[in-house]
Image (cartoon, grey):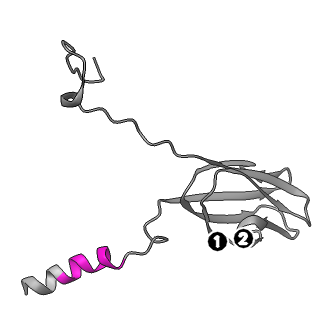
Amino acid sequence: MKYVLLFFFLTPLAGASDVNSLPNREISIIVTKEGYYPKSLSVFEGEKVKFYVTSTVEGPDCLIIESHKVFMAANKGKVSEAEAVFDKPGQFAFYCPSSKNDGKIVVLRKAAPKREVASERKTEGSQWTPKEY
């Protein structure tokens, strides 16, 4: 019994693919008479983004992100879903040709945190103190 539990516990770790292990972000977008809400989005490089889109207007609307092959209908009272991975920093446009709405997604480079270990400091007489002080 111990071996079966250990197998099921370790199996997801051994078989995890790169796409499933990416950080996830969920973004909801509403199409209104004035355009997309929100009109500008920010995500980090390497995130898998799940989009949820709906509309408040009766006419045909959509959300297209050509660079990531996302094509979604935006219908009143219904929610459409799509996913995309943003692996390069930069700005990416989204739009709908039928309603002439547009917006942008800004993909930010994720900076690696600078780590410092107190025991590895080279200066003499320096003392480590917590960041709160």
Contact? badges 1 and 2 (CB < 8 Å)? yes
Q: Quadrant of residue 129?
A: top left
| Image point (50%, 42%), residue name | 111
Query: Which residue is rendered at x = 47% and y = 63% of the image?
Result: 22
Residue at the location (69% across, 72% down)? 78
User: How far from the left and from the top, in percent, is residue 25?
Assistant: 53, 58
Magenta stretch containing residue 9, yes or no? yes
Image coordinates of residue 72 in percent, x first then y, are 74, 72
The segment highlighted magenta reads 7-15
User: In terms of depth relative to the viewer, which is nearer, 99 or 95?
Assistant: 95
Residue type at mark 1: give it.
Answer: Ala
- Residue 8 has which mark? none
As helix, strand or loop, the secondary structure at mark 1 comes to strand
Q: Main secondary structure of the magenta part?
A: helix
Q: Is residue 23 above or below residue 18?
A: above
Q: Is residue 27 magenta?
A: no
Q: Which residue is mark 2?
A: 70
Residue 61 in the image: x percent, y percent? 84, 67
Question: Does residue 34 appear anywhere in the picture?
Answer: yes
* Amino acid identity at mark 2: Val
Indicate which label's residue lies in the foreground, 1 or 2. 2
Residue 57 image offset from top left, x and y in percent: 83, 63
* Distance between the alpha carbons at the discs numbered 1 and 2: 7 Å
Q: Residues within 10 Å of mark 2 (few under 14, many from 20)?
A: some
Q: Locate the N terminus and report the quarter of the image it occupies.
A: bottom left
77 vs 14, nearest the viewer: 14
Does residue 65 appear anywhere in the picture? no
Q: Which residue is mark 1?
A: 82
Query: If the image is split into quadrants, where does the C terminus sit?
Result: top left
Q: Residue furthest left?
A: 2
Asked if residue 115 lies left or right of residue 83, the reply is left
Label 1 or label 2, whichever comes before in sequence order: 2
